[in-house]
Amino acid sequence: MAKQFDVLVIGGGPGGYVAAIRAAQLGFNTACCESESYDDPKGEVRLGGTCLNVGCIPSKALLQSSEHFDNARHGFVMHGISTGEVAIDVKTMVKRKDNIVTQLTGGIKGLFKKNKVTLLSGHGKFTGGGEDGWEVDVAGEAVVAKHVIVATGSRPRHLDGIPVDNKLICDNAGALAFDAVPKRLGVIGAGVIGLELGSVWKRLGAEVTILEALPEFLAAADAAVAKEAWKVFTKKQGLDIRLGVKIGKVASGKKGITVEYEMGDESHVLECDKLIVSVGRVPNTEGLGCEAVGLQLDERGRVAVDDHCRSNLPNVWAVGDVVRGPMLAHKGMEEGVMVAELIAGQAGHCNYDAVPWVIYTHPEIAWVGKTEQQLKSAGVEYRAGQIPFSANGRALGQGETSGFIKMLADAKTDQILGVHVIGTNASELISEAVVAMEFHASSEDIARIVHAHPTLSEVMHEAALSVDKRPLHF
Ligand code: FAD
Ligand code: NAI
């Protein structure tokens, strides 16, 4: 007889495991199936999905280690600290990263136990059913659930003719597990992964060349932020980023990898020892049995959903990277909570206008809301306030003076429309702006909030004041 649940979640990444925990908290008999073991030494499935195993968490661990290394070599000197010769033991660095991943993925299994979520190991696939109960095959076992939440996530997009072996030519999984610093690292794609992982290996001593198809750098970011980032990454940090390239033949052999590419009218060849391919991600819907039940996909192969993550089928929902919207862990988690609460008849909500973006380079880049170019092209009248970190006492004390905060507010109502940060701790600073946008605050609201002194948050305060052209310290 089939196992029966109120809610079955397919996929144990941030979207799925959070949906499962919230559904169980709300009193539903909940199961979550996960198929991937992510090289677990015991071969057991691991929870946490891309984010915990081969994404957010391991990349941030390596970014932190490499930043310490870079500071020891170059950053401490200005404080009068000399370190002598500094060495990196990549194996120890990678082991530390692996331990963090193991701790966190194991922690989610603990959270499942605590919340009484049943973990089913194996691939989930719709086989039939309907509104009163969907039938899903999990590794040969029949499961029936009244509600199914699809949270199958995404995988790296690979390019034709560039075979990823995760040894020489790597996607994110391989690029997080190098056992030594490559002398010459090539990266295809100057997006979030290319910049974060390019930064890691650059700081550790690799010569890094990033080949980007678009003629524009960081097109999704505010143009002023992208310009500042370009200056810091290329001029100060020495990342060699080449824009407007068309990748040709890629070959690998004993002497390394060669990447033929065109830039303008010229043909070039990049020689490198490792190559990272980071050109975006594709949704995981293959083998999900969509056709068996008529689950509709959109033009990009994602599960088609409305603003509340409802699919075309009754009681079938989808969240996270497998649906429209930014491929971000926190967006998926929020959708997971929303869906569980909607199933419980509550007013689940996810404010897509206030989802922050963070790029964990140094300086960090973070934003929420609209960019200046988006407001211009939509014909929205706005006022802008921008303050550099170099005008802030705490930033000077920390020796972290590059970058700025820019606030954009509606010219008539003063409601905050977007906030853009490039600078140290941008990932934390953006939270104030997210709260402000969530509660439809104005720049005047931020200007009237007491900000502790001396803190980096005073730059946010001054940016708000400068929207009204009355900054006090700039
Ligand atoms: P996933 O995390 O992809 O999880 C889906 C899970 O479902 C997987 O474990 C998969 O094995 C499983 N699955 C798939 N199909 C089935 C099936 N049929 N049956 C059973 N199980 C199945 N986002 C951020 O917000 N911040 C960051 O700093 C950040 N850094 C990143 C760094 C890198 C290198 C990468 C690659 C991504 C990063 N992301 C970051 C993006 C983030 O990882 C994703 O947005 C997030 O993991 C999406 O969560 P998800 O639950 O939708 O999918
Ligand atoms: P991305 O979409 O951020 O960047 C891909 C880049 O590759 C783009 O600039 C694109 O123009 C370029 N590109 C595409 N095809 C190309 C080609 N043939 N040749 C050269 N360049 C090409 O995707 P990325 O970096 O793979 O990351 C995937 C997603 O993972 C991100 O979009 C983001 O959603 C998530 N992520 C989030 C992070 C964070 O929140 N800090 C960190 C890393 C990933």
Image: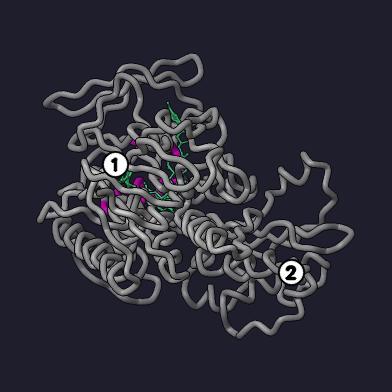
Type of the residue with mark 1: Asp
Residue range of the region highlighted in magenta in the rendering: 187-204
Q: Mark 2 sits on what residue?
A: 464
Q: Tell me the quadrant of ligand 2.
A: top left
- Residue drawn 48% across and 54% down? 332
- Residue drawn 27% across and 58% down? 119
Q: For this view, does 357 lie left or right of residue 28?
A: right
Magenta span: predominant SS is helix
Residue 249 position in % (x across, y down): 31, 17
Residue lying farthest to the front in this orientation = 1
Q: Nearer the viewer, residue 402 or 35?
A: 35
- Residue 312 figure quarter: top right
Q: Mark 1 sits on what residue?
A: 137
Q: Nearer the viewer, residue 350 or 85?
A: 350
Give SS at disc 2. Answer: helix
Type of the residue with mark 2: Ala
Residue 195 on the magenta segment: yes
Is residue 208 visible to the viewer in this orientation of the structure? Answer: yes
